[in-house]
């Protein structure tokens, strides 16, 4: 279950079920003012921070078109990482993690993580408007990106594809800088 507590007195504010589509290991929850953004599969839910009530739900890439390329639900997979910066919600998408793997399941940290690329990896980076889910850009990485090695600073997104490359994208357009 997902629990929310009052930071001042520790009182339970609300709780709700945690589904198998929701990852437990990585940046998949973001506090945004009085709301909470939570990744669930290929969707993002916006919850009221005080009550836990679902205010909105959107799928940033399901059927959305950027240029001539549309992404379907099967291609979307699962959100592996997300961040909110300069008014853009940026996410890494990849195939669903195996149900029996993850930090809180039976995989050991670092054992095979970067060689089998089963947990937390994806190849599709997407930026969207956090209020509407409208996609602003997408970047298809040539090799799988490790969701634990993605960061944003100074209007740039940096990512690592272990054993292959480190890359930098311009956050305004999603274009590769290097």
Image (tube, rainbow, N blue to C red):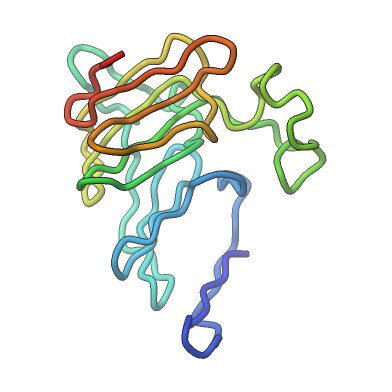
Q: Of residues 81 and 85, which is closer to you in this image?
A: 85
Q: Of residues 155 and 93, which is closer to you in this image?
A: 155
Q: Is residue 11 above or below residue 2?
A: below
Q: Is residue 14 above or below residue 59?
A: below
Expressed as whole percent of the image width and height from the top left, the position of residue 53 reads: 39, 70
Q: Of residues 154 and 92, which is closer to you in this image?
A: 154
Q: Is residue 63 above or below residue 133?
A: above
Q: Is residue 8 above or below residue 137?
A: below
Relative horizontal placement of residue 35, taking residue 52 as reference (left or right): left
- The residue at 79%/36% (across/down) is 107
Expressed as whole percent of the image width and height from the top left, the position of residue 37 reads: 38, 55
Expressed as whole percent of the image width and height from the top left, the position of residue 148 reads: 54, 35
Q: Quadrant of the C terminus?
A: top left
Q: Quadrant of residue 157?
A: top left
Relative horizontal placement of residue 97, taking residue 58 as reference (left or right): right
Expressed as whole percent of the image width and height from the top left, the position of residue 69 reads: 26, 14
């Amino acid at each position: 279950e997902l629990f929310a507590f009052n930071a001042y007195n520790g009182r339970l504010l609300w709780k709700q079920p945690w589904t198998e589509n929701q990852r437990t290991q990585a940046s998949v929850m973001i506090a945004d003012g009085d709301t909470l953004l939570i990744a669930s599969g290929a969707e993002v839910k916006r919850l009221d921070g005080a009550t836990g009530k679902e205010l909105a739900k959107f799928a940033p890439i399901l059927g959305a078109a950027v240029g001539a390329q549309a992404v379907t639900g099967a291609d979307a997979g699962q959100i592996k990482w997300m961040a909110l910066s300069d008014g853009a919600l940026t996410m890494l998408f990849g195939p669903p993690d195996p149900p029996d793997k993850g930090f809180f399941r039976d995989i050991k940290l670092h054992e095979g993580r970067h060689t089998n690329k089963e947990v937390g990896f994806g190849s599709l980076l997407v930026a969207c408007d956090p209020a509407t889910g409208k996609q602003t850009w997408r970047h298809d990485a040539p090799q799988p990106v490790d969701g634990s090695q993605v960061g944003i600073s100074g209007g740039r997104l940096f990512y690592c594809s272990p054993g292959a490359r480190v890359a930098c994208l311009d956050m305004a357009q999603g274009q590769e800088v290097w």
